[in-house]
Amino acid sequence: MPERTIRSDHVFHGHLLRLRVDEVELESGRGATREIVEHPGAVAILAWDGARLAMVSQWRAAASADLLEIPAGTLDPGEESGVTARRELAEECGLAAKRWEKGPSFYTAPGFSTELLTLFLATDLLPTEASAPDDEELARSWLTLDEALAASDDGRIVDAKSLVGILWLARRLDGEAP
Amino acid sequence: MPERTIRSDHVFHGHLLRLRVDEVELESGRGATREIVEHPGAVAILAWDGARLAMVSQWRAAASADLLEIPAGTLDPGEESGVTARRELAEECGLAAKRWEKGPSFYTAPGFSTELLTLFLATDLLPTEASAPDDEELARSWLTLDEALAASDDGRIVDAKSLVGILWLARRLDGEAP
């Protein structure tokens, strides 16, 4: 049951984000305001070497903290998500993968943001040369699945996409167990 | 390794969101721009009656779609998250709970948003009277855990907080199994 948009104003155009304010009419006829952050979309990568998961730590201004996350990145305009995923895994982790599989896609914050994020599972990993982009400073690490689950449980991982990815991978690997 | 903020400008003040643009200096000395959406924070509730999970469907302007989600809502200014959780469960599902437990907290989109969301597990449910707030129109449903997991796998649930919640609950209940 869609809302009817009466009026839509773009109030900010940035490098990454745009913000618009919609005046809408609900099915009941009542009016409401929606503040919507337009985002180009993103990918995150579960880079799994069969025993360990590639992770990155970086300063997140929005959280005022270093966050431990799975590698991820934003789509360039018009870019296919699989291309972004390969680029980000190389840039952030110095890794390529022989096998790629698309996992779930989800809205990170559907109450106010258009960001749709697609998870990828990358396996048969091998090192590749790549430099991190100019505006990111990352620390790389490897966690076993048990370590990643423990870090999800004890608050060392506080990033939604990483939690979805780790819990999704755990369930999947559990299904593969003999 | 924090970035040094050189300059910070608020460019939008809305009802729900504020947006600021920070000019920062990285450890290396290089400059970068951060576009940050300031959000008051949120809660989401796993309302579990021992066999089924309470879910809501609602139109999400940001996704241009009806999304199936666990009940959730935004903190009022200065509000303690447990208070928000009780209010939202009543408003969205017409439910109260005798037992409340705090689950994980996480940033929904730490690359650009300050939104920190706390999951709650609500059990020993009972009906309560409450009306939905004026600007939301919701459809309520109940899913078994298997149904919720199937909906997570087949793309009927595409909301990050719901995926974290359902996968977290599945792992927890699995641990409780005899």
Image (spheres, coloured by chain):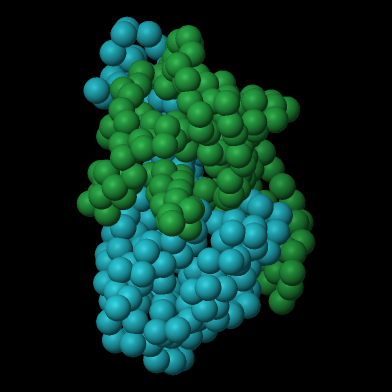
Chain colours: A cyan, B green
Report the quarter where the C terminus of chain A lies: bottom left
Instruction: Determine which quarter of the picture holds residue A165.
Output: bottom left
Report the quarter where the N terminus of chain A lies: top left
Q: Which of A149 and A47 is in front in this view?
A: A149
The reply to whether residue A38 is in sight is no
Q: Is residue A95 left or right of residue B17?
A: left
Q: Which of B49 and B130 is in front in this view?
A: B49
Instruction: Determine which quarter of the picture holds residue A101.
Output: bottom left
Query: What residue appears at the point 31 percent right and 22 percent down from the top-left corner?
Result: B139
The reply to whether residue B150 is in sight is yes
Query: What residue appears at the point 52 percent right and 48 percent down from the top-left corner?
Result: B108
Query: What residue appears at the point 47 percent right and 38 percent down from the top-left corner?
Result: B46
Q: Position of residue A52 (x, y in %)?
A: 48, 81
Furthest residue in direction front, as rendered: B178
Q: In this view, does A62 lie to the left or right of B144?
A: right
Q: Is residue A18 positioned above or below A90 on the image?
A: above
Q: Position of residue B4 (x, y in %)?
A: 77, 61
Instruction: Determine which quarter of the picture holds residue A79.
Output: bottom left
Q: Which of A106 and B9 is in front in this view?
A: A106
Q: Is residue A7 positioned above or below B8 on the image?
A: above
Query: What residue appears at the point 36 percent right and 69 percent down from the top-left corner?
Result: A174
